[in-house]
Amino acid sequence: MGYKTNIATSLATKLVGSFITLGISVITARELGTEKLGEISLVVLAVSIAMLISGILSGPALVYFTPRKSIKHLLVPAYIANIFCSVLVCGVLAAFDLFNSEYLLYAILISLFQGIFSTHFYVLLGLEKLMAYNFIGIIQAAIAIGGIAIMIYVLKIRDVESYFIGQAISYFIGFLITIPFVRQKTYSDPNSSYGNVIKDLLGYGLVMQIASIFQQLNYRLSYYVIHWQLGDAKLGIFALTMQIAEGVLLISRSISVVLFSKIANLTGKEDIIDKTNTTLKFTYICTLFLLIGMLILPVSFYEYIFSKDFSETKMVLWYISPGILFLSILTILSSYFSSVDKVRVNAIGSFVGLLVIGITVWPLTMLMDLKGGAIANVISYSITLLVSLVCYVWIEKIPFMSLLITGKDFKRFSKSFGSK
């Protein structure tokens, strides 16, 4: 399939997946309330951190090495890393009271099942099985919302366990579904072995995952500060707002996957710059329109959907929305840096952003409540984006003005995305 077709397919499936995820948010918000939603968000964050660390051997580096190494030599270390990190990382975070230790077993199981599921997902990308990648993602999300709904409405389990059990089951079934698709016909390295695969994964994936860890802490450090300063009920409101706002990122996240695959197979510098610039501008425009649509909805809409406990959601959305626009651009640039082996730029930018939010989030949250947490995130995202933009312009030696949208760009979008 061509670039335009891959993007359209990814967008369509991500849109469906986003509606399902929104459905999960609606169910949990209405039935569990703000405080329990805050508790859930801390467990989800712990799972994300565990997966990022195990991702050194089971993360995005698999996309690059799948065509080159034996799948057996890739999967076995990935599985072991997922098991080890799920137990160790979740255990350590629970010990430091970064989430309720009562939910430790659920955190470990979700981390393990989501980890092995994601491992197969990266392999599918490496095998260029985008259709399977997209539709299995929808199936997993559908199982999750179905499981959670059954737990709450049929079995009458109106507690956080309903969310955890539903998610764990969905990722495990999703993992089983991917197994028939994870088959490799050929690979280019005749010397593939467990030893050199682990060495290559560490060399390629370590910097990439360090960048991702900095990025995740950059995005989510505010959760811990809000939890400590304002309590889990306020955290539940903030976490739900972030889920809604980040739903707008479905465009950039969908396109970035296709862009990564495309650039990794391009050799001409001009082609890489043209594809990146056009994709970045297209993403920016679409994200802006979605944000405007989200912001013009009245407060009563959010109260009707999620309940009156979430009346502050619209206010937080206004404050966080510039940061979401920055993140949409940053997602495209991060995909570009990863595809041209410049992942250190992602690490540097995320580390700088982490320092910024580390300095600003505590005083701003103390002074301005949830608004302060949102503003701290926006400041952090803007600094991270600035670092990435400066590096991109410097690496490719292009004028900054070439990134600004002009009337000609609207005419070029269709032609550019239609190229093979």
Image (tube, helix red, strand yellow):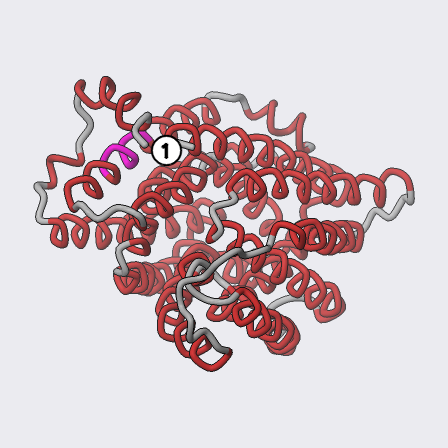
The residue sitting at the right extreme is 155
Crowd around label 1: few <14 · some 14–19 · many ≥20 (10 Å): some
Which residue is at 38% across, 46% downward? 261
Above/below status of 57 relative to 325: below
Above/below status of 299 relative to 259: above
Tally of numbered discs: 1
Q: Position of residue 96 (x, y in %)?
A: 60, 77
Segment tinted magenta in the rendering: 277-282
Q: Position of residue 254 (x, y in %)?
A: 45, 39
- Three-letter amino acid code at the position of disc 1: Tyr
Q: Is residue 47 visible?
A: yes
Q: Is residue 279 magenta?
A: yes
Left or right of 144: which side holds 270? left
Q: Majority secondary structure of the magenta segment?
A: helix
Which residue is at 11% across, 35% downward? 401
Q: Nearer the viewer, residue 76 or 84?
A: 76
Left or right of 310: which side holds 333? left
Q: Position of residue 327 (x, y in %)?
A: 36, 44
Above/below status of 406 relative to 365: above
Q: Position of residue 117 (x, y in %)?
A: 63, 56
Q: Nearer the viewer, residue 36 or 280?
A: 280
Give the residue number, with chain letter if any, for mark 1.
3
Task: Check the picture and name the quadrant holding the N terminus.
Answer: top left
Which residue is at 31% across, 50% downward? 264
Task: Identify the element where label 1 is drawn.
Answer: helix
Q: Is residue 35 visible?
A: no
Above/below status of 305 relative to 169: above
Q: Is residue 97 magenta?
A: no
Task: Check the picture and name the quadrant holding the C terminus.
Answer: top left
